[in-house]
Amino acid sequence: MTDYSFIYFPRLNFGTTMKNLIYLLSILAIACQPSSPNEEKIVADPLPSWNDGQTKNALLQFVDDVVEENGSRFVDVNERIAVFDNDGNLWSEKPAYFQLLFALDRLHEMYPDHPEWDTIRAFRLALADHPDSLKELHTADLLKIVQITHGNSTMEDFERQVEDWIRTAKHPRFDRPYTELVYQPMLELINYLKANDFKVFIVSGGGAAFMRPWVEGVYGIPRHQVIGSQIQAKFEIIDGKPVMMRLPAIGFIDDKEGKPVGIYHHIGRKPIFCSGNSDGDLAMMQWTASQEGPYLNLLLHHTDSIREWAYDHNSSIGHLDRALKMAQEKGWAIIDMSRDWKVIYPFELN
């Protein structure tokens, strides 16, 4: 039923002329007319933080294609699987992976009870609080730090530690909680895909247990749709209560070739949409591109040294070389951060 509340009717009296009556009736007649079938409807932009251009058009066109039931590129709802890397793709990853910064903070908290760590190279360097010392840490050193700081606790205790850190820790450059360093354009993209019946997963080299306590509130992605690296765990009965104990040993690393393996084990379907930002995401992009039907690979290139950071092949964190070359060769969609994004972080909108 048409809403007439916007029309103001003056009080009529015997002095009202026929001209005024005709005027009022004409307004009513116009208001009651049905919309023209050719009249264009104004549709809200689902990606308002993206600049118009090739990348945004590719995203919109892909989604339009796969949801068009009578189209040649239609994809059934059950097959609409989207996977996103997390570090450097959904939130920033400089000056170091945020989970590593969490591990270093945990190491400092635990240190008073472990004076013997002074004799262990990895811990001695990490506790030195000097950038040059941290640069000397090898992959084996980092794994040792993660094992110690992420193990020897129940699942519930570890999640509380993560929640406390996420709530209180602040980024050294922006002086904001790390969860405010998420990318506003990616939040819009996730919501856009979900609105079109995509099931969205995070597939990250970061720890699944580190992400699960906060991803629902930050990304709107359920915790059971998080695929990440895992520490070994063991079911135990302690004081008559069943608990899941986290052990100080790596169980699975969800990076590089491990990502498609994690997707296979966790989802059981190939994605039709894949988003990443580094060579660590190349394997899952190749897995996505092996789809027989429509797919879209989206590679984020960090090109904004003013609002964020600019880096690629020379960076030890978020190293991007092979994936960028392949994306250019294969015609995959590439986000140029400085060109394609109006804003980077949600706090820029305030």
Image (cartoon, grey):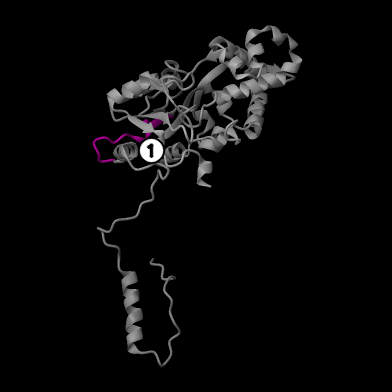
In the rendering, at what x and y percent does residue 132 appear? 59, 16
In the rendering, at what x and y percent does residue 106 appear? 67, 22
Tell which of 211 and 350 is nearer to you.
350
| Residue 81 covered by magenta stretch | yes
Left or right of 237: which side holds 28?
left
Q: To which residue does mark 1 refer? A: 340
Q: Magenta segment range?
A: 69-83
Tell which of 29 and 107 is nearer to you.
107
In the rendering, at what x and y percent does residue 57 appear? 31, 40
**Which residue is situated farthest in the top direction here?**
119
Q: Is residue 281 visible?
A: yes
**Amino acid tagged 1:** Asp
In the image, is residue 45 above or below residue 73?
below
Left or right of 173: which side holds 289?
left
In the rendering, at what x and y percent does residue 31 appear? 34, 70
Left or right of 175: which side holds 200?
left
**Which residue is situated farthest in the bottom direction here?**
14
Q: Is residue 235 visible?
A: no
Q: Residue at x 67, y 19 (%)?
A: 107
In the image, is residue 269 above or below residue 122?
below
Q: Quadrant of residue 239?
A: top right
Q: Quadrant of residue 247?
A: top right
From the image, give the main secondary structure of the stretch colored magenta: loop
